[in-house]
Every structure is written in structure tokens, then in C-alpha cells.
Image (cartoon, helix red, strand yellow):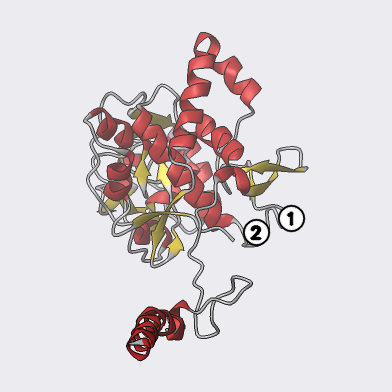
Amino acid sequence: MKKVIAAACVLLLLLFLIPLLIIRADPDTDDSADGTLPLDKTVVTLPVAASDSAVSVNIKMEDGTVAALSLDKYLWRVVAAEMPASFEPEALKAQVVAARTYTLAKMGHTTENHPDADVCTDINCCQAYIDPTQASANWGTNAEAYTLKIATAVADTDSMVIYYSGQPIQALFHSSSAGKTVDAVEVWGNDVPYLVSVDTPEGDEVPNYHSSVSVTPEEFKTRFLAEYPDAVLDGTPDTWFSGPTLNSAGGVASMTVGGVTVRGSVLRSLFSLRSTYFTVSATAQEITFSVTGYGHGVGMSQYGANTLAAQGKTWEDIIHWYYTGVTIEPMAGE
């Protein structure tokens, strides 16, 4: 009887211990006493979204000094300068994301205009910029509401960036277009797959959507011949212009003036036109450029974004509308 009881005890003990031995023998659960994982384990650290407040931007100011601001504070100043604060909240958010992406694309690349800074406040090089004190003065009684509105747009899109093939895009934007944006290749000669011509819905609600610039024939001759001395500007002014070639947005890609082929962007610069979407009329007394829209026409139209937002589009919808084939993701932390 004693032998039976002893055998039973041994059997129970084995039944209890075997599962424990099997569990401990599993290498995938064999943690050492200090909490480290087994050597055959690989630890993968996933990217953590970096907050705007954790990113520092070095900015070359108008006086030549370099100031450091957190990305959220810098973006507030950019958006306050670049887009009317009266715009729809979703349009402001789209502007923030475009500005954040544009900034990140600039950071880490040395630029001749500001070798010691990531960006500058010169709109011909980087993005517009305004000090909060000046912005408040411009807004008057709306200052408190507009200050909060832009801060909310920055916070609500915190860390979100536009990517193409894993890299932040050149998130170009402009004020308004004439029904279509312009393919980047037609402006700068580079084929950029996410900056292609798309329809854009703004129109006559845009201030100064239609504008004109008039010069005398003599003034036109002086400016044009200074750049193109081989041009022949004889006879009546109406004979000077011919053969406009249109770009994907219907603007002037090139035009023949005095026998010389000139890009529409050159004429825009020479005569301070608001865009390359223009027509020319000429008489013996006056040459007039009739212009629609404002800006280079590439990327996101700001007034178009506002129209889309008023129609119920989200900021994500707006980004995908103007930048073809992109993704929107948080910027990765260190």
C-alpha cells in the first residue's frame, strides 16, 4: 500500500513539473533575470512621431541675424504671413501641412542665401514670415480670434508631412490660378510627378483675380530691348506680338516678340504681371497685359484650397487634390 501511495505521489509530482519544464525550454519565452531578451530576439524600434515643438528651425531674419524657433512657432508665423487668417479652417490646415513639408525639405540642405540657417524670411527664396506683434496689429479687432485660429491649425496637424517615395515633397503653393494649376516641368523644366496640372475651383471671388498692366510702346521697348537687344520692334506695336504657345493651365508658355521667342515667365517678370495667364493688346498709344490669377501656378492654389474647404473638403482632401500620388504621414523622430 505504501508503495502505491509513493508511486502516486511521484506521478503527481511529474505531472506538475513537466509543463513547467516545457515552458522554460521554449527559447521564445526565456527571459534572463535582468529583463533583457534572448540573443536570438531582434528588437525593432518603430519611428515615433516627432512633435513640432521638439523640432528646432534656424531662421535667417531680415536683418541678417539667425534665430532659432521651434517648428510650431515658426509655422504659425509662416501661415499668418502666407494665407489670410479669415480662410476656412481646413484650408489653413492644408497650408500648415504644406509649409511644414516645405520647411523639412529645406532643412539639412545648404543654401547660398542662408548657409548658416535652415530657412530665411525672403519670399523669393523660402516662405513669407511675420512677427506675431505685427500680425496682431494688421488684424486689429480680429487679432485674438485669428491668433487662436492659426495656432489651432498648427496643433491639429501636428507633425503631419507630405511624402512622395519616402521623401518630403517640394510642397509649392501659390495664391490663385485660372481654372488649372501648371505642371512644374513647364515652369522650371523639371518633371516632378506630384506637381502636375490639376483643375482648381477658385474664380471671381478672389480679390484682384483679374488685373491689368499697361505701358507705353516706348517703355515696353526700353525694358524689352535691355534683355533682348536682337528683337526688332519697328512698325506699329500690334505687329510686335505673335504666336503665343499655351501651357497646361492655358497661360502663356512662350510668345514671339519682335521676332524673338520669349518665355511667358520672363514677360511676367519684366512687366510685374501677377501670373503668366495673360493676353496682350497693343495700340500706338498703349500696350496692355490682361492677367488672371496670381503666382507661378504650381502646386496648391491657396484660394482654390479655400473654395474646396468651403465645399466641405478636409485638409487631407485638399492636399491630395493638389499634390498627385502623395502620402500624408507623421514625421519620424530621431
At x 64%, y 42%, the residue is 70
Give the residue pinned by disc 2: 111
Q: Is residue 203 visible?
A: yes
**Disc on res. 200:** none
Callout 1, which amino acid? Asp
Asked which quadrant contains residue 36, the reply is bottom right
Q: 10 Å neighbourhood of mark 1: few (<14), some, or many (≥20)? A: some
Asked which quadrant contains residue 311, the reply is top left
Q: Is residue 181 visible?
A: no
> Residue 212: percent from the left, percent from the top?
37, 29
Q: Is residue 289 left or right of residue 105?
A: left
The quarter of the picture where the N terminus appears is bottom left
Numbered disc 2: secondary structure: loop
Depicted 271 relative to depicted 125: above or below: above
Give the residue pinned by disc 1: 116
Q: Marks 1 and 2, Cα distance to the nearest angstrom?
A: 8 Å
Callout 2, which amino acid? Thr
Q: Is residue 152 left or right of residue 328?
A: right
Numbered disc 1: secondary structure: loop
The quarter of the picture where the C terminus appears is bottom right
> Residue 231: percent from the left, percent from the top?
44, 55
Residues marked 1 and 2 touching at CB (< 8 Å) = no
